Amino acid sequence: MPNAVFAGSFDPPTSGHLDVIESALSIFDGLYVVLAINPEKDGLFTIDERIEMLNAMNRFGEQMKVCKWDGLVTDFARKHGCSVLVRGLRNAAELPYETTMAYMNQRLDPSIKTVFFLYDAKHVDISSTLVRDLVTHNRLPDDIVPQEVEKVLRQILQRRGCPLS
């Protein structure tokens, strides 16, 4: 199978993101996990901190490559010889937005297809937005981020002088 691209803001990476990565790597030879830089979005975590967390959860060696990209994801895919974009779906409410993006990406490059993976049911309530909210309130329930991400996240917050209890 070809290589694929899984792009997102990953602010921070969640257990749901890891579900999608594991699913994609069960099918594709390799996966570029791309931190898509959006200058119009202010993240809780810096680009470098998010890259650090993504690298920490790489359990797959060379099969998973973490990159950052400031541009269209279809351009990244074309540049790296990928013919598939991977997207994760938590629930049916996300489908309208995700299909609109898939159609636009297909318009931008008809040779690139989008494949959707469902999050594991135990992670459907997890989003980066909710994790950010919980972290700002000094809370981090078990299993909402991979253990490797939790460790790095705690180190980042410690460096900032606002450790999680």
Image (cartoon, rainbow, N blue to C red):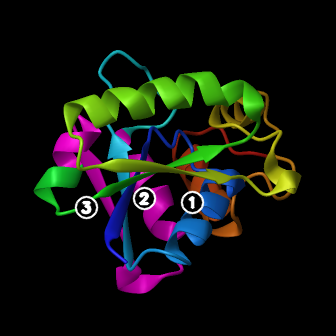
Q: Is residue 127 left or right of residue 34?
A: right
Q: Which residues are magenta?
A: 47-76
Outermost residue toward the left?
79
Q: Is residue 150 visible?
A: yes
User: Is residue 72 inside the magenta stretch?
Assistant: yes
Q: Which quadrant of the figure has residue 52?
A: bottom left
Q: Which residue is mark 2?
A: 52
Outermost residue toward the bottom?
61
Where residue 33 appears, x then y in whole percent?
40, 58
Q: Which residue is mark 3?
A: 82
Q: CA distance from mark 3 to mark 1?
A: 30 Å
Outermost residue toward the top?
40
Q: CA distance from mark 1 to mark 2?
A: 7 Å
Q: Is residue 29 left or right of residue 26?
A: left
Q: Which residue is mark 1?
A: 152
- Quarter of the picture containing the N terminus is bottom left
Camera-near label (3 vs 2) is 3
How packed mark 2 is, by other alpha carbons closer than 10 Å (few <14, some 14-19, many 20 or more), is some
How packed mark 3 is, by other alpha carbons closer than 10 Å (few <14, some 14-19, many 20 or more), is many
Q: Is residue 98 left or right of residue 128?
A: left
CB under 8 Å between discs 1 and 2: yes
Where residue 157 appears, x then y in whole percent?
59, 44
Q: Secondary structure at mark 2?
A: helix
- Depth check: 12 or 69 in front? 69
As shown in the figure, which amino acid type bears the numbered disc 1? Val
Residue at 42 percent across and 34 percent down: it is 102
Disc ID at residue 90 = none
Residue at 87 percent across and 48 percent down: it is 141
